[in-house]
Amino acid sequence: LTFWKNSQASRSWTTTARVPWLSASPSSGSLTTERDQVHVMVNPAGLAPGAYSSSLIITTTGADGTIRKTAVPVSLTVT
């Protein structure tokens, strides 16, 4: 997953997964360049066959303290 900032100021960010089978690495950082990358991972261990969906939440904090949350939808099918 690649995301961009739309200003010159650096922004700190964190990721939050709403379900245990979803994670991101790294889980936090600072956007000091124009873009940053996060590896999104799913772990289907222990899940019954079927369709699953959730969101990875990216929270950014601007230099002025403004907090913005973006939900990235993630779907998983276990066969």
Image: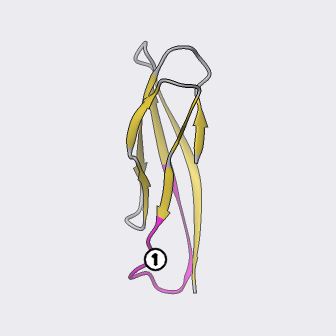
Q: Position of residue 72 (x, y in %)?
A: 57, 49
> Which residue does the image show at 53% across and 25% down from the upper left?
33
Between residues 49 and 24, which one lies in front from this camera angle? 24
Q: Position of residue 18 (x, y in %)?
A: 42, 56
Which residue type carries mark 1?
Answer: Pro
> Which residue does the image show at 44% across and 71% down from the upper left?
43
Q: Position of residue 40 (x, y in %)?
A: 50, 56
Please give the residue where the numbered disc 1 appears in the rendered image: 44
Q: Quadrant of residue 30?
A: top left
Residue 44 on the magenta span: yes
> Disc 1 on helix, strand or loop?
loop
Residue 72 on the magenta span: no
- Please state if 26 lies on the left or on the right of 40 as rendered: left
- At label 1, counting other C-alpha atoms closer than 10 Å, the crowd grade (few under 14, some 14-19, many 20 or more) is some
Quarter the C terminus occupies: bottom right
Q: Which residues are magenta?
A: 42-56
> In the picture shown, does residue 10 fall above or below 24?
above
Between residues 6 and 37, which one lies in front from this camera angle? 37
> In the picture shown, does residue 5 fall above or below 2?
above
Q: Position of residue 5 (x, y in %)?
A: 58, 26
